[in-house]
Structures are given as structure tokens and as C-alpha cells.
Amino acid sequence: MHSLFSSPGLIFSAAGALRVVLLFYGLYQDAHSAMKYTDIDYMVFTDAARFVSRGASPYVRDTYRYTPLLAWMLLPTAWNGWFSFGKVLFAIADMVAGWLLVRVLRDQMGISGPRALKYASIWLLNPMVATISTRGSSEGLLGVMVVALLWAVLQRRVTLAGVLLGLGVHFKIYPFIYGPSILWWLDADKDHETRDKKTSQGVISYILSLATPDRITITFAALSTFSALNLSMYILYGLPFMQHTYLHHLTRIDHRHNFSPYNILLYLSAAGNSGVGFESIAFIPQLTLSAVAIPLALARRSLPGAMLAQTFAFVAFNKVCTSQYFLWYLIFLPLYLPNSSLIKRPYLGISAGLLWVVAQALWLYEGFQLEFLGISSFVPGLWLSSLFFFAVNIWILGIIIADVGSLPQDTGKRGAVATTREDGQRSEVTGRVTSAEKFDEKKRRNIEAYMNDLKALGDGGAE
């Protein structure tokens, strides 16, 4: 098994072969089965691309709720014989995301090549990931953007990170939750140095001191990219772009394929029977946890771990929760597991994985009864299975938060990422030497010079 993971070419070939097999299987199932392999969202994407190819707006296609960039990227699907182009693109994208995971694990977290490849294979060789991409879900593109964002931040390429953050938020809103974590993590050592001065400086001066050059740069780059893309799309497509890409999510009441405990309320709201317009305020607990509480508590202990916890919370508390959204947090799993109790305590890890799968299976059974057989399974079946899945997710989220929260504060070395070596000892990969380290080095040199002077005096006295 070790030799398997010592060969990146073998792992990536296996990942590619898995996706090719699923692509061809999908063609066969679509041609011979009433239950189609191709995701309904892919039909929406390709219809929008076809409208764009004819010079029309992608929003002519009902239920297209995405940036026009996606329709533009899928223009080849409007050509004869190129319908599966998007599926191939998404499959390649999630493989590129896997390659970036290897880079982060190896270069930023200091994990050896074979071990890094083993953890990255949780994404690369995951049948769920490969299936979702080859069915035509665009989440693989988000995976590339998010992991590239993390890599750029850890490499302290702040301008590139800002551009990627702005692009990711434009492409799909949720990556904005990573902004607070990134800003809080950046220049944490400087905040640590100025914290003791807070009393003498005053609160306002302390807050102003948080506006470091790196934080200003990444914020400006992100806002500029996001604003430029939105302005361009608004000029081209007007209010429908704003309505379908952003404003729609405030009042979204999708209830099909929705694992969320809000499912039945959304169904009643869609029918006009709920009596409460909760769909416009359901995001408040979700964003309070994922965009405020978790970044403040965890970002300075582990940026990848904080981003996993944020995404897990965002998806678990979202009023619409479909299987594609699980990829949003699965992309961070290889970066979390090396230091997790799920690995250190195999019984806990196996239990968490089994419960997560069983809870989904229970919901899918009830959902199949409702959506495919027309059997009303809303209460108690669908409702109880939604609550059970939510409870399992909250339990797992608690484990993640406890694991990341137990790590030491990552404020001692600028650009350092804490990890655990194969021998179990703590190590750190450092991106830049801090002023404290320079001071220690200077002190060491002074002591050495002093000892050399003493030795020279002793040698002189002996003569």
C-alpha cells in the first residue's frame, strides 16, 4: 500500500480512470434507463449555454441561478457532439483540486510525499466526488478556486489570494465566509506583538493597527475583482443577473432533494401555507456561526481547519442542503485529518463516517418514496430523517471544532502551518522569519563572539 502512494502518476491515473468509467457509464444509463445519470442542473447549464451561443441571455433559461461565466465556459456543449464537454471539464477540475491538495499537504503542512498523496486520495479516489462531477455538477470548479485560495494565502501571495476570493464569491456566494478567517490569520504575529500595547494606545488605535498592508491588499484585490465582474455582468445582462445570481438566495424556497430540516417548511412556504416568511431570515444563525464565531475562535489555530469548520457549519445550517454541497467541505477533509481525533481514535472516525452515510441513506429512502413513487412521506419519515441527519452533522461539527481548537495558537511565526510529523512530534513550516527570531539569532551571535573573546584572552594568558 505504501508503494501505491509513493507514485503520484499511479494515483492520478487511477483517479482519471475512475472518472472516465463513470462518464461512459453515465452515457449508457442515460440511454437505457428512465432514471437519468446526468444531473438536472447540467441540463440547466447547457440550456443556458445554448441561449448564449445564440446571442441571448443565459437567464432566458428558467431556474438558471448562476453567473454568466459558467454558461460562457460551457459554450462548447452547444456544438454537435460536445454535450459532455462540461462533465469532462468538471472532472478535470476536481483532479486539479486534488493536485493542489497534495501541494498544500506537502509544501505548507510539511507532510511527506506518500503520506500527502494518501490523504489527497480521500478526494481524488472518492467515488462520491467523481460521481457528482461526472453527473454534471460544477462543484469541482469551486473546489479548484477554494484550494487555490488557501494555497495562495499560505504562500502569502496576497494579491493572487484576493483575486481568487473575489472570483470565488462571484462564481458562488458562499466563499465570502473565508474572508474573515483569512484576515484574522494574516499578520497574526503582528497582532500578538501589539496586543500588550492596547491599553496604552487605546481601543481605536489598536483597531487601526489591525489594518496591515497584507490585509489591505487582499481586501482591495478581492473587492476589486468581485466588483469588476459584477459590474461587467450587470452591464451585459442587467437586473436579471442580480436577481438570479444573488437576490434569489434571500427568498429561495427549494424543497426537492433537500436534506435540511427546513425542508417541510420550505414546501409549505412554496405552497403558501407556512404563514411565516422564515426563508429570508434563516441565514442569520448560519452566518453568525460560519462567518463570525468560527473564524474568531479557530482561524489562528489552523486556517485549513477553520475553513473546514466554517464550510461544514454553513452547509449544515443552510436552508437548502443537497448532496453537491457536501463537496464544499469534503475538499478540506484531507487537510484536517492528519491532526484529527478521527484518525487518532479509529473507533470515533469509523462511527462518524458510518452515521453520516446511514443518515443520508435514511433520508434518501424517504426522498425516493416522495419524489419518485409519489408516496407522501413528509411526516414522520422525511422530517425525522432530516432531523437525524442534522443531529449527526452537528455532532461531527463539534468534533472538528474541538480538534482544531485544541491546536496551539498559530501566532508565533508568520506564515507557519502547524502539523504533525510521522514520528508524532510537532513541527512547523515557516514562510518568513519573524523579528523575534532575528532577535534570538542576534543574541546567539553575541554570545558566541563573547565566548570567542574569552577564549582568545585565555590563550593569550597561557602564552
Image (cartoon, rainbow, N blue to C red):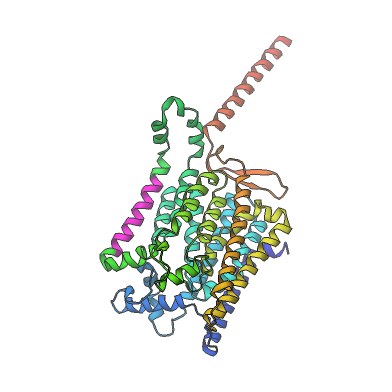
How far from the left and from the top, in percent, is residue 38?
50, 80
Q: Residue at x 35, y 52 (%)?
A: 223
Q: Is residue 141 visible?
A: yes
Q: Position of residue 177 (x, y in %)?
A: 46, 53
- Confirm whether the magenta stretch covers residue 229: yes
74 versus 446 height, above or below: below
Front residue of 291 and 48: 291
Q: Is residue 463 visible?
A: no
Q: Is residue 139 above or below residue 226?
A: below
Residue 149 vertical position relative to residue 363 in the rendered view, above or below: above
Whether residue 149 is situated above or below residue 138 in the rendered picture? above
Which image quarter holds the C terminus?
top right
Q: Which range is magenta?
A: 217-233
Q: Nearer the viewer, residue 280 or 458?
A: 280
Overall secondary structure of the magenta section: helix
Q: Residue at x 48, y 72 (%)?
A: 137
Who is closer to the viewer here, 30 or 35? Answer: 35
Q: How many labels sit on residues?
A: 0
Residue 260 x, y percent position in the rendering: 52, 66
Q: Does the magenta portion include 25?
A: no
Direction from residue 316 to residue 224 in the image, left or right: left
Residue 368, x across and y down, in percent? 56, 79
Locate the N terminus by quadrant.
bottom right
